[in-house]
């Protein structure tokens, strides 16, 4: 009996609707931090999955886009947040920032937004440094947003700032597949994603009801958060992605300090005691 084909999603609320959708026949879903997804698929540990836009060029030889599917936000993301001691506009070269090690696109987006101010760029905080700001993503950001901090009281939503700066949505990740994927699997995955898109409202409602508490949200707030995420990318989202990649190219050579990928974890289970219809 052959092993299931692995498909990478995130370990966050933003992709839990895919768990309720269920993997395609012969496949299984595995949850992996965004920064580790590209290396895992490129290494053959998975066939397809959601990969940060900032990593697409790095894996261009082995991965290709799988339709117009991904993770995008037309406005506020609510789960990609910079918590800081001073307002975003006042973070200068003396500021020390602690950066998430889970996402490339979010770290690079922060640097692009800081660079757009034309002011001094903050520095990475060392392990022993006092910090003036911290970039947090995913469910941790959702939980923390509801717990005001006396030391880091200012909160900047990076997708919201990207929209204000460019007038475009922010695309954080895209569905990709290995270039050597069998044609039958490629077609199966596209059919699976199309079926997800058709059933997305129900699946998002299930994720909000069953999984919102994982991120510290009640059902209504989880639903509002998930409704702000776009998984089927239209012309505006694709223009936003193009602008983001163009800005990355313009700022080539900046210090974005990627982290080493984590090992592939166990399959993403349908946990939480909520029946998947």
Image (cartoon, helix red, strand yellow):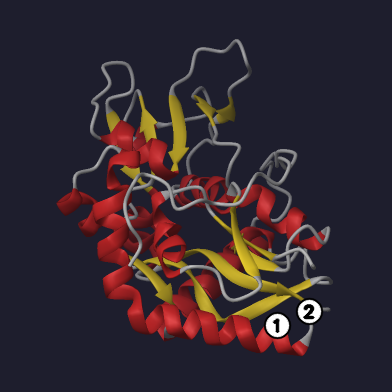
Q: Where residue 18 sits in the image (x, y, percent)? A: 45, 65
Query: Where is mark 2, residue-wise?
Result: 181
Number of numbered discs overlaid on the protein picture: 2
* Mark 2, other Cα within 10 Å: few <14 / some 14–19 / many ≥20: some
Please say whether residue 233 is visible from this viewpoint.
no
Give coordinates of residue 248: x percent, y percent.
Answer: 62, 60
In the drawing, does residue 53 fall left or right of residue 181? left
Q: Residue at x 34, y 70 (%)?
A: 167
Quarter of the image with the N terminus is bottom right
Q: Position of residue 66 (x, y in %)?
A: 62, 80
Nearer to us in this view, 179 or 158: 179
* Badge 1 element: helix
| Mark 1–mark 2 CB contact (< 8 Å) | yes
What is the quadrant of residue 177 in the picture?
Answer: bottom right
Q: Residues within 10 Å of mark 1 (few under 14, many from 20)?
A: some
Q: Residue furthest left?
A: 220
As helix, strand or loop, the secondary structure at mark 2 comes to loop
Q: Is residue 177 left or right of residue 11?
A: right
Q: Determine the CA span between mark 1 and mark 2.
A: 7 Å
75 left or right of 111 in image: left
Q: Residue at x 53, y 31 (%)?
A: 122
Q: Residue furthest front?
A: 1
For image coordinates 52% across by 81% down, the residue present is 192
**Residue 205, relative to residue 113: is it above or below?**
below
Disc 1 designates what residue? 185
Rendered view: 8 above or below 150: below
């Amino acid at each position: 009996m052959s092993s299931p084909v692995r498909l990478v999603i995130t370990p966050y609320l933003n992709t839990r609707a895919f768990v309720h959708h269920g993997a395609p026949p012969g496949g299984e879903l595995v949850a992996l931090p965004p920064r580790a997804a590209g290396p895992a698929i490129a290494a053959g540990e998975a066939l397809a999955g959601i990969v940060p836009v900032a990593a697409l060029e790095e894996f261009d030889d082995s991965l290709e886009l799988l339709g117009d599917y991904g993770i995008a936000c037309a406005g506020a993301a609510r789960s990609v947040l910079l918590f800081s001691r001073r307002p975003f506009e006042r973070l200068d070269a003396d500021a020390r920032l602690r950066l998430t090690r889970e996402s490339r696109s979010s770290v690079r987006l922060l640097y692009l937004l800081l660079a757009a101010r034309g002011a001094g760029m903050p520095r990475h905080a060392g392990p022993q440094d006092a910090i003036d700001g911290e970039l947090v993503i995913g469910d941790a950001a959702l939980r923390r947003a509801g717990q005001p901090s006396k030391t880091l009281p200012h909160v900047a939503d990076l997708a919201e700032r990207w929209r204000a700066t460019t007038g475009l949505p922010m695309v954080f990740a895209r569905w990709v597949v290995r270039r050597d994927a069998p044609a039958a699997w490629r077609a199966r995955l596209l059919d699976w994603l199309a079926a997800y898109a058709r059933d997305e409202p129900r699946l998002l409602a299930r994720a909000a009801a069953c999984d919102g508490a994982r991120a510290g949200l009640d059902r209504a707030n989880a639903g509002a958060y998930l409704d702000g995420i776009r998984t089927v990318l239209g012309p505006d989202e694709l223009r936003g992605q193009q602008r983001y990649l163009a800005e990355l190219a313009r700022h080539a050579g900046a210090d974005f300090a990627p982290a080493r990928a984590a090992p592939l974890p166990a399959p993403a289970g349908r946990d939480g005691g909520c029946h998947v219809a």
